[in-house]
Image: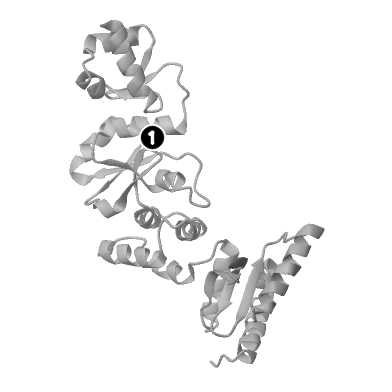
Amino acid sequence: MGADSTDIIARLAGAQHGAVAVRQVIEAGVTRRWIDNLVDRDVLRRTAAGVYVVNGSEPTWHQRLSVGLLSLGDQAWVSFEAAAALHRFDRALREPVDFTVLRELRNRAKACPYRVHTTVTMPPIDVVNVDGFPCTAASRNVLDLALGRVPTIRLEAAIDSAIRRGLSSPTALSERLASLRGPGRWGVRRIDQLLPDTGGHTMLERRFLELVRLAGLPRPRTQVIHRKDGKHVARVDFLFDPFGVVIEVSGRLGHTSDAERARDAQRRNELQDLGRKVYEYTWADVKERPGYVEQTLTVRLHDAGWRR
C-alpha cells in the first residue's frame, strides 16, 4: 500500500510541477496517515493550507502557480500580471504570481500564500487554458491590467502583443470593454484612449499610428502582405489604401550589414514594381521630429490623390 500511495502522489506531482493537494491524494485512495508519514520523512513539504510539494522538485514559477491554484481550489484562475506573463505579452513582468476567484469564494484567499483578486463574474469567454493553467483570456487580461493600473507603456505593449499574436483584436477588446464597463470601473478610459492606435507590431509603430491620428490623416492598414504571382514579396508596416503609399518605420539600429541592406533594396524595388510608393521614417523622425513626419506624409498622400 505504501509504495502504491507514493506512486500515486508522484504521478500527481509530476503533472503539477511537483505540487499536490491533500484532497487530490485522498480522493485517489491515499490515507492522511501516509501523507503525514511522507512529511516526517522529508519527502513532502507543506507550502500552503492543504498543499504540499515534493522535496527536491525544482522551485519554479510554474510550481508557484500550481501551489496557488491548488490552495484556491476550483473556480480560480491565473490572472493580472501572472496571466500577462503566461500569455507572453510584451514587457510583462518576470514570473509574477496573481490569481482571481469569484467574490463569493474570497475566503479561500486566506489559504493562498500569493496575491488573490476577486471578481463578481468570470464568464466562459474570459477563461482559457495556457500551458495547462486555467487563466484569464487575453482580452479580459488587458482589462484587468488597466484595472491594476500598470504603467501605460506596459498596457500599450499588452494590447499590441495580444492583437499581434492573434489572442485578441480591437473588436474583441471593445466588446469586452462594453460588457464590463460600469460606474467607477477604473481603467476603462485608459483603454478607450489606447485602442485607436492599435494594430502595429512595435511601440514605434503605435507612436506612428498615434501621430497619423492626431494629424487628421487617413488611418493606414497595418502589416499588409504583398504577393506577386502567388509569391510572397513583403509584409509592410503601413499601407495607405487606395493611394498606394507604403510607409516603413525603422528602429534605432536598423539594418546595417551589407546583406541586410541588399535585401532591403530588393524588397523596396519589388514593392515599387507592384506600383507602391515606398517611404521610410526612422525612430528619430517619429519620436523627435513628428512635425517633419506629418508635413512630408501629408504632401506624399496629397500627391498620391488624397484630399483632406
Give whichever of 128, 273 is nearer the camera: 273
Furthest residue to the left?
A: 104
Residue 278 appears anywhere in the view: no
Q: Which quadrant holds residue 140? A: bottom left
Q: Which quadrant holds residue 55? A: top left
- Residue 59: percent from the left, percent from the top? 46, 25
Name the residue type under label 1: Leu
Question: Label 1, on which residue?
Answer: 65
Q: Residue at x 22, y 52 (%)?
A: 121
Does 222 sit above or below residue 255?
A: below
| The N terminus sits in image quarter | top left
Residue 187 appears anywhere in the view: yes
Give whichever of 278, 106 is nearer the camera: 278
Q: Residue at x 27, y 34 (%)?
A: 72
From the viewer's perspective, is 25 left or right of 140?
left
- Residue 217: percent from the left, percent from the top? 54, 83
Give whichever of 248, 70 is nearer the camera: 248
Q: Residue at x 58, y 73 (%)?
A: 238
Furthest residue to the front?
A: 229
From the viewer's perspective, is 125 left or right of 290?
left
Residue count near mark 1 (Cα–Cα under 10 Å), binned few <14, some 14–19, many ≥20: many
Does 267 sit above or below residue 276?
A: above
From the viewer's perspective, is 206 left or right of 183?
right
Does 150 sit above or below residue 286?
A: above
- Residue 239: percent from the left, percent from the top? 57, 76
Considering the numbered disc 1 on the image, is that residue within a helix, a strand or a loop? helix
Specify the color scheme.
one colour
- Residue 30: percent from the left, percent from the top? 23, 14
